[in-house]
Every structure is written in C-alpha cells, then in structure tokens.
C-alpha cells in the first residue's frame, strides 16, 4: 500500500497498517489473568479459544495464491470449526478476534477504514456464504471517566438464514435480560474492588442472543440491508471498502460507508459505562468474525487505517 | 530486519485422545520452532507429537519432525524449516489419560 491509495483519513493518522509489512501489533484477544495463579477466571476459560490472526497469502488448493489487494499478505482471522445456535452465547472458538492496543491522542472524530474480504473454508463443496454469521470492527475506547464500545458489524447469517444487514454496537435499553456474565473480570483500584463486565462491554460474546442473529448488544441500522459481494466459490475473494466514523465529543456515531452505501448515523448514541480502573484513555481497535456452522470462516484484512481529528474535513489525497 | 512472531495456538487447554492444533499460515517465515508447555500430565501418560504441513490448510501430511516422547511437566520444543505455507502439530496421548498444555509456534523470516 503506497500513499494511502483508496483511503479518506481524517487529519491525524493514528496508524496505517499494511499487512505486507507484518502484523503491525495485531494479536489475539485473550481474557485477563487471575491475580492468585497463572490461569483464567473459570467462566472466561472459553474465551481463550478465539482464533489468533495470521499473515495470509490467501492460498487455496485449487486456485493457488490469491494474494492481497496491495501485495501478497493480508491479516487473516479464522474461527474454529464450531458454532452454537444463534440464540445461544457463542461457542468457544467460534470467533476469530484480533486486537491492537494504543491510547488516544485527541478527542473529536475518529475513523476506521479498511479493505477486507471474507470467505468460508473450502473443505466441503458449496459456496459457504451461509457459514459466516457476522464480522466487524469496534473500538474499546475510554477516557478518565467512562468506557465506550463503538463499532459496526455485518450480520450475514443466523441459523442458516441469510440476514445481510449492518448493526452498531449499542445496547437495547428496553431489555431486562441479563448481560450474561456477572463474575469478576479484573482487579480494581483497591484490593476490595471487583471489576465486572457491564452492559455494553464485551458485546462480542455477551448480551442475550436471538434466533435471527441479533443480540441485546446490537442495534439494527435502519434500511441497511446490503448484499455484499460473495463470489461463486470460496476461493474467489473480492476486496471491500469499510469506513466507520464516530464523534467522541458527543459519544455518537457519525457515518458508516460500505462499498456503494453511506449510512448517516448522526444522532445515534453509543453505549457509555463508567470508568474502569487503570485503563484511562485506552484505544483498542478490534476486528472479528464469527461462524454460523461447524465450518471455519475467515476474515482477511488487506490494510487498515485509523485517523482522528477535530473536524470531519477530509484530506485531499 | 526480519519478522518475528510468536503465536499461542492453545493455552491451558485440556486434551485427551488425539488432538491437533488449528491450521496456521506461516508462509512468510523461513524457520519455525514449536513449543509445548506441559502444565499437567496424568501419571503414566505419554504425548507423541509430529509436525504437519499442508498445501491448503485442509489436508495434512507429516513433515517428518517429531517431538521426543513427552512424559513430564515442563517445556519441550522442535525446530523445523522448509515447510511451505502452513503448519500444525498433531498429537496422541496414552489412552484414557489427560494433559493440560499451552502450545505455541515461534516464527522468523
């Protein structure tokens, strides 16, 4: 990737990652360690199974190497060949998750752009489009007073039924259902304080789920049905453009762009919870994909750019 | 400067019977080491592990490198090179026995 071809970043580029140059600090997401022994909180052990990212040449048994949009390598996220029904919490290993960890340099607007594609493992005949439940991107973002998950996902298929619409990370305020995990998650500021996962945190695997693939943690963007290009065999992959912009001053979404569509999200608030100990001004971008059947599914990211700025004025390339 | 990457494929995971790590693409790397950290192992249990390669990440072949039979808690490793695009470890454990392992690949190239 040279000179950010195809990107429309805001004024300050936080990072510009081309996976021909390595993994650029993206790694697997794992749960917190307990404080007494080197192991995980029992209820979170399943969260050690999320598939780690890898540098992929997108090579297939009969197509050969597909390569990436800007070279040979992309970052691939893979699930294991497992899935729970859509109305259950995700099976351990049914998601591939990659995270990068930094901190904020500014308030104002924040934008994520990427070129990505998705496909199913070519281990059995058939297109495999319905093996993919969802994929997406979010920021775990904090300041000195609060924590917010801003993100968007493409809900592709649930229990074998195609959905093909976009959703935002936003808790259903009307639901009285439990979020799904009330246990301890990390040590607090003091030995007596217990940190737990509140509604709106770890939306990826918490929140009551429903047979249509939606959950209490996601909000359907109105009129967002979009049939993304999924080619006629799993070894033909087409790169897609994604852009999500949020307003951190207002705590609101601004815009989602996907291929030919632009969704105006202004006025839609994200879900804000109270401060978490020690992680002030954290900014963690996260990518993920989830399977809908007992078949591995893959999200490939050719390159990803995050930018920020006090205004939405776009740089002229 | 070379790339260097450690990926943990299984962490504190219980295994019985035959088991294999998830497929991992490493075509960019010239050399790899595989580490098995044994946290727990039933008395009398022996783990036998071989390195496997693949054209497509779906059909797997023995590469020829094998761990010395593992019968003790601690770290164990093998070295491998010229492995193409994919790597995984394929293991068996003494029938009826259980182990708890962390399994990693250490890649450079």
Image: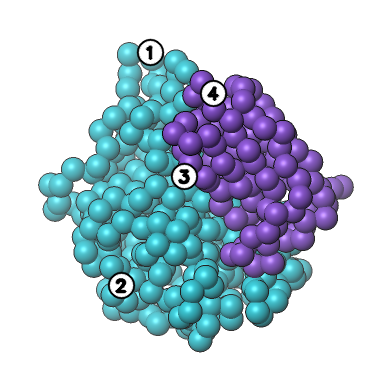
Q: Which residue is mark 1?
A: A191
The answer to whether marks 3 and 1 mark residues whose Cβ atoms lie closer than 8 Å is no
Counting residues from the start of the chain, the first of labels 3 and 2 encountered is 3
Q: Nearer the viewer, mark 3 or mark 4?
A: 4
Q: Position of residue A253 (x, y in %)?
A: 38, 60
What color is chain B drawn in? purple
Secondary structure beneath label 1: loop
Q: Position of residue A293 (x, y in %)?
A: 37, 64
Counting residues from the start of the chain, the first of labels 3 and 1 encountered is 3
Q: Nearer the viewer, mark 2 or mark 1?
A: 2
Structural distance between the alpha carbons of marks 2 and 1: 47 Å
Structural distance between the alpha carbons of marks 4 and 1: 41 Å
Q: Which of the numbered marks, if any, corresponds to residue A228?
A: none
Mark 1 belongs to chain: A
The answer to whether marks 4 and 1 mark residues whose Cβ atoms lie closer than 8 Å is no
Q: Residues within 10 Å of mark 3 (few under 14, many from 20)?
A: many
Residue A174 is left or right of residue A295, and the answer is left
Residue sitting at x 18%, y 52%: A173
Q: Residues within 10 Å of mark 1 (few under 14, many from 20)?
A: few
Q: Name the residue nearer the viewer: A153 or A95.
A: A95
Q: Which residue is mark 4?
A: B44
Identify by letter the chain in cyan.
A
Q: Residues within 10 Å of mark 4 (few under 14, many from 20)?
A: few
Counting residues from the start of the chain, the first of labels 2 and 1 encountered is 2
Mark 2 belongs to chain: A
């Amino acid at each position: 990737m040279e000179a950010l071809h195809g990107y429309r970043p805001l004024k300050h580029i936080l990072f510009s990652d081309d996976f021909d140059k390595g993994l650029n600090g993206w790694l697997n997401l794992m749960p917190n360690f307990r404080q007494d022994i080197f192991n995980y909180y029992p209820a979170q052990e399943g969260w050690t199974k999320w598939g780690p990212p890898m540098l992929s040449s997108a090579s297939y048994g009969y197509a050969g190497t597909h390569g990436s949009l800007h070279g040979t390598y992309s970052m691939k996220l893979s699930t294991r060949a497992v899935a729970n029904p859509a109305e259950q919490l995700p099976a351990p290993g049914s998601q591939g998750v990659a995270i990068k960890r930094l901190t904020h340099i500014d308030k104002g607007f924040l934008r994520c752009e990427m070129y990505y594609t998705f496909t199913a493992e070519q281990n059995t005949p058939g297109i495999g489009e319905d093996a993919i439940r969802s994929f997406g991107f979010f920021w775990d973002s904090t300041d000195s007073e609060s924590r917010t998950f801003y993100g968007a996902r493409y809900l592709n298929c649930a229990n074998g039924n195609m959905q093909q619409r976009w959703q935002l990370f936003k808790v259903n305020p009307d639901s009285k259902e439990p979020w799904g995990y009330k246990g301890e998650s990390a040590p607090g500021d003091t030995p007596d304080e217990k940190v737990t996962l509140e509604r709106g945190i770890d939306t990826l695997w918490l929140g009551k789920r429903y047979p249509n693939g939606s959950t209490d943690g996601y909000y359907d963007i109105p009129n967002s049905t979009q049939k993304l290009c999924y080619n006629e065999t799993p070894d033909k992959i087409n790169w897609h453009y994604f852009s999500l912009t949020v307003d951190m001053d207002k705590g609101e979404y601004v815009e989602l762009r996907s291929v030919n569509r632009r969704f105006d999200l202004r006025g839609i608030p994200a879900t804000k919870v109270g401060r978490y100990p020690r992680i002030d001004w954290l900014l963690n971008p996260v990518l993920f994909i989830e399977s809908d059947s007992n078949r591995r599914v893959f999200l490939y990211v050719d390159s990803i750019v995050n930018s920020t700025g006090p205004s939405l004025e776009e740089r002229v390339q | 400067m070379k790339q260097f990457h450690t990926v943990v494929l299984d962490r504190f995971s219980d295994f019985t019977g035959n088991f294999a790590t998830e497929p991992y693409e490493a075509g960019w790397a010239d050399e790899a080491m595989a580490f098995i950290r044994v946290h727990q192992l039933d008395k009398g249990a022996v783990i036998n592990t071989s390195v496997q390669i693949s054209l497509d990440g779906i059909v797997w072949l023995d590469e020829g490198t094998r761990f010395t039979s593992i019968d003790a808690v601690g770290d164990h490793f093998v070295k491998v090179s010229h492995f193409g695009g994919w790597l995984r470890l394929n293991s068996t454990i003494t029938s009826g026995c259980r182990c708890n392992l962390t399994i990693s690949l250490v890649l450079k190239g």
